[in-house]
Image: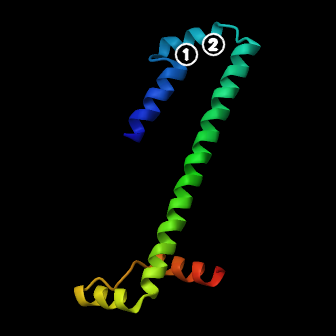
Amino acid sequence: MLAAKKLIETRRRRGKGLESRITRNHERVSSADLVKAYQEDTARKRDMIRRANNANDRLILVVEALRRLRADASFVAILEEVGLDDIPDNLARRFELQGSAS
């Protein structure tokens, strides 16, 4: 899905075939076109940063919730009872890092 979005965005910006690249090399680029391209790229990067920040916020929320659940003895007992007491090493490290930071 992400690859398809990338392809569509690339085709929207550059055109579908080689012909559009060849003919564009001979066209003069106006300052307005450059400003528009810069603004579009800046908006795209701002959106990417916003989405990354949102994902990071969600990750922090989930890690904190899991850390609190892992601190609850009855929850851990239930996990052990059903055989789900093992967690991936990277999550365990995150719990330790977040626990020492608070």
State the image coordinates of residue 38 (x, y, percent, origin top left).
70, 27
| Vertical order, 16 against 9 (above or below) | above
Q: Which mark is on residue 96?
A: none
Task: Please indicate whether residue 62 sits to the left or right of residue 37 in the image.
Answer: left
Quadrant placement of the C terminus: bottom right
Marks 1 and 2, how far apart in space?
Answer: 6 Å
Relative depth, front residue between 52 and 3: 52
* Residue found at x 30% / y 85%: 79
Q: Quadrant of residue 26?
A: top right
Which residue lies at the image location 49% right of the left edge and 28% below the top edge? 9
Residue type at the position of mark 1: Arg
Residue that badge 2 annotates: 25
Q: What residue type is labelled 2?
A: Asn
Q: Is residue 14 above or below residue 57?
A: above
Q: Is mark 1 on a helix, strand or loop?
A: helix
Tag 1–tag 2 contact (CB < 8 Å): yes
**Looking at the image, which residue sits at the far left?**
82
Position of residue 101 measured from the top left corner of the image (x, y, whole percent): 65, 80
